Amino acid sequence: MPYICVRGVEHYYEWIKAEDSNSVKPVMVFVHGWAGSARYWESTAKALVNDFDCLLYDMRGFGRTRGRSPLAQASIAVADATAPHEQAEAVEELTYELDEYARDLAALLDALKIGRIYLNAHSTGASVATLFLNLYPERVEKAILTCSGVFEYDEKAFTAFHKFGGYVVKFRPKWLAKIPFIDRIFMARFLRRSIPKRERQAFLADFLMADEQAALGTMVTAVSKTAAEVMPQEFARLKVPTLLVAGEYDQIIPAHMGRQAAAMSDKVEFMPIANTAHFPMLEDSKTYLQQVRKFLQLEA
């Protein structure tokens, strides 16, 4: 499996390209959501290979990319005085703020020598992508944000969410994956329509293997007073043409939050997909791809 050092952390990445084509195509980068991995983007990427070279990667602390605390990074670098320059960069203090993940993406593109891209991101990854679009607008041709939006701060609700989420993250015994039908139970809140068992089991596996600090850190930063204040400003600043896709019955990021976000910039087009929830690209891939192709002005 291919890995590349990004800001001192070995990141997993993979290319999905058309097997029978040697032509140079534009690059589309896919960004996954909280506690997930690039695996759930594979079917979407494969459906777009005639038009794009698709780059998938696992964000720091998730999937096949392991997370390291700043202290651990520094210890490794100091312990190995002969480490190459890339490993020496591990002394950089990385946090779990979403803008740091946006900078991770920029560093990944630099390391792979990729210039201008198309960006396709989901959920918490879409928040990372929104920040990336404003930090590096010159690097993105067009963007698709799936299941993203803005919300109002509610101290009581946020505190309860963080407390419950903390219990969920800390109690993740590996034997959970062996319980019959646990994948259905785990995914029930995220879906309106069924998806293949293989996809459900992959989501559960990614959740169980997510780095605890990364899972807790990104949960707290993504759902916070700061995020509630900053994200509306970030959406209002968008200058890159963007499609914001929402699932009609999404319980995680309700469609009205996406509609509110899209209304903040004339560069954002809002598209709800009927009878889907938090994974419209998997629940109704046909409609999702139709809307993406229309937005990107690709041939049907």
Image: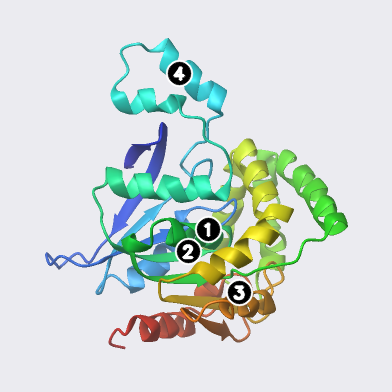
Q: Which x, y percent locates residue 96?
A: 58, 42
In the rendered image, the vertical position of residue 90 relative to residue 225, given as above or below: above
Q: Is residue 278 above or below residue 75?
A: below
Q: CA distance from mark 4 to mark 1?
A: 28 Å
Rendered-image quadrant of the N terminus: top left
Q: Which mark is residue 76?
A: 4
- The earlier-in-sequence mark between 4 and 2 is 4
Q: Earlier in the sequence, mark 3 or mark 4?
A: 4
Query: Which numbered disc flags the more N-terminal residue, 3 or 2?
Result: 2
Instruction: Give the vertical position of 39 relative to 119 (above or below).
Output: above
Q: Residue at x 52, y 49 (%)?
A: 99
Say if residue 224 shows up in the picture. Answer: no
Which of marks 3 and 1 precedes in the sequence? 1
Q: CA distance from mark 4 to mark 2?
A: 32 Å
The residue singled out by tag 3 in the image is 261
- Label 2 neighbourhood size at 10 Å, few (<14), some (14-19), many (20+)? many
- Per the image, label 2 sits on a secondary structure element best described as strand
Please report contact status of discs 4 and 1: CB closer than 8 Å, yes or no. no
* Viewer-closest of 97 and 207: 97
Q: Of discs 1 and 3, which sits in the foreground?
A: 3
Camera-nearest residue between 106 and 233: 233
Circle 2: residue type? Ala
